Amino acid sequence: MPALLDARSLVKHLGGRRVVDGVDLACETSQIVGLLGPNGAGKTTTLRMLYGFLRPDAGLIHVNGVELGRDLVRAKRAIGVCTQDDTFDGDFTVEQNLTIAAGYFRPRPVDLRRRVAELLERFDLAGYARAKPETLSGGYRRRLMIARALVHRPRLLFLDEPTTGLDPQARMGVWDLVAGLRAEGLGIILTTHYMDEAERLSDALTVLARGRVVARGTAKTVLGDLVGEHVVVVHATHGAAVAAWLRTRGRGEPASVLGAWHVPLSGEELAEFARAFPALRYEVRGPTLDDLFLKLSLAP
Amino acid sequence: MRWLAAALEWQSRAVVGRHLRVYMRNWHTAFLPPALEPVTMLIAFGLGLGGYVASLSWQGRPVEYMTYVAPGLVAYATFMTAMFQALFAAFIRMRYQRTWEGQLTTQVELAHVVWGEVLWAGLLATMYVAIVSVVLVAIQWVGLLALDLRWLPALWPIAFVAGCGFAALGLCFTAIVPTIDHMNLPVFLLVLPMGLLSSTYFPLEHPVLVALNVANPLYHLAQTFRAILIGGPVGGHLAGVVALSALMLGVLVPLDLRLLRRRVLGD
């Protein structure tokens, strides 16, 4: 049985710059793959190639066993897309947005009326069926965007920063819906800037930096590979001594957040750090995806 | 020729269907402008200006100014409807409503979006011409016009072809103007001069304009409509409309696609 999504060696140039450089990505049934990376890492360009919006300069993409470049229309029948910005049709009501979107797919979704009613119910939009999308709150607009991406019963769903700008309650509502979709067998590619979201929802992470995959695996593996086992948080007033110590180990200046330095260290390095600074007050914590982002942002 | 085949594919029809559904929802207000505009224009130009002009010479025979201007009005309506759809309505859907982006996340591709806009503009122009036709029948019935109305429905398919060509031209500007305010440039530099200097409202006999109008599809459209409704040889100008519309579609739709691929897809 082929993977729902199998992308290999993707390359894309935009404006004369190599924005995506040899990216591989795969997604199986009932799996959420988090695609992470700092701004400019190539996430959105990669995603746009995967759902057929952009053509790759090199590389192959198979969706549900169909090569995207060979039969785009057939491949797109299996894809649902929730873009980062709201792109619903403002000329129609919430309910009409679902029926209009369904009209852009062949074969047409079977029993459309029931499918639309089911989605309105499931996404808690039934009370707004006759409302215009622009009258909805941010959380409900996102719900509509996801519902619209599902109207034709796709097998693979792309969610591009689905909770950006939402309040915590609305975010958690979207998380529940996404987790439910995975349980139903959908493969989901998720991009997000929220580290807790990526950690909670994703079964696997792929981390991009400067257009390349720099790590992949579970959150724990990725963090261990790229950040380290521990992060020492030390006040910046002690920065000169710590920086000098790091330099002797061939390390550059660490990330600074609100007057504190966050120094990723291995277990061995942490023991040496403790011996080198016996009188220093500091905090040791486990690494998070925020540390990963900070590290990638600082990388030359 | 993939771009050409897209015109006949179901996705382009789905895009047209979407626009038609929006339009028909507001049919009672949407049908008002094409019905009222020719009445206003005929009163202003026909009765007002016509009072000073009396009669004109058309194909070597005298015609009343009202009768001369009525077919020109139909041609002008075709041109303006298609151009304004492709310029303003398409720009709003592309830039502000982001309708195109939503469509492009489905099985619809950019070529279908572009053809959908072109075909819709052609269809809307045809609908406007059909409404104007009804108004002309009414005005003739009260005795203000002396047109040969037997071939009136023949105007509709011609309006469709020309409307599609004009829309392809309008989309070029939609693809390149940075904001909707910049639409003033094509409107004042192209649309209005072309609309008025094409023998739509009055005959133009200056040799330079006559020479320029050989390549002006709106001029040929006005003359074709005039030949059909007043009586005269249709062939040459009809061939001009068809040839120039085909040329606009053949050259400008691929150009629209190229420019819009960069603008919409960033590619």
Image (cartoon, rainbow, N blue to C red):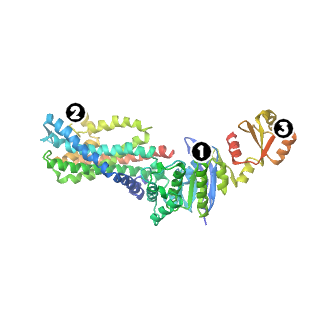
Which quadrant would residue B172 be assigned to in this image?
Answer: top left
Q: Position of residue A229 (x, y in %)?
A: 78, 49
Q: Could you tell me which secondary element the residue under label 3 belongs to?
A: loop
In contact (CB < 8 Å): disc 1 and disc 2 = no
Instruction: Say which amino acid is labelled 2.
Output: His
Number of dots carrying numbers: 3
Q: Nearer the viewer, mark 1 or mark 3?
A: 3
Instruction: Say which amino acid is labelled 3.
Output: Leu
Q: Which residue position is annotated with label 3?
A: A280
- On what subunit does the disc labeled 3 rest? A
Comparing B200 with B43, the one in front is B43
Callouts 1 and 2 in the same chain: no
Q: Residues within 10 Å of mark 2 (few under 14, many from 20)?
A: few
On the rendered structure, is B53 left or right of A281?
left
Check the image and report above or below for A94 versus A250: below
Q: Position of residue A175 (x, y in %)?
A: 61, 55
Q: Which residue position is annotated with label 2?
A: B206
- On what subunit does the disc labeled 2 rest? B
Q: Which residue position is annotated with label 1?
A: A19
Instruction: Say which amino acid is labelled 1.
Output: Val
Q: Could you tell me which secondary element the residue under label 1 belongs to?
A: strand
| Residue drawn at point x = 66 percent, y = 57 percent | A203
On the rendered structure, is A144 left or right of A5?
left
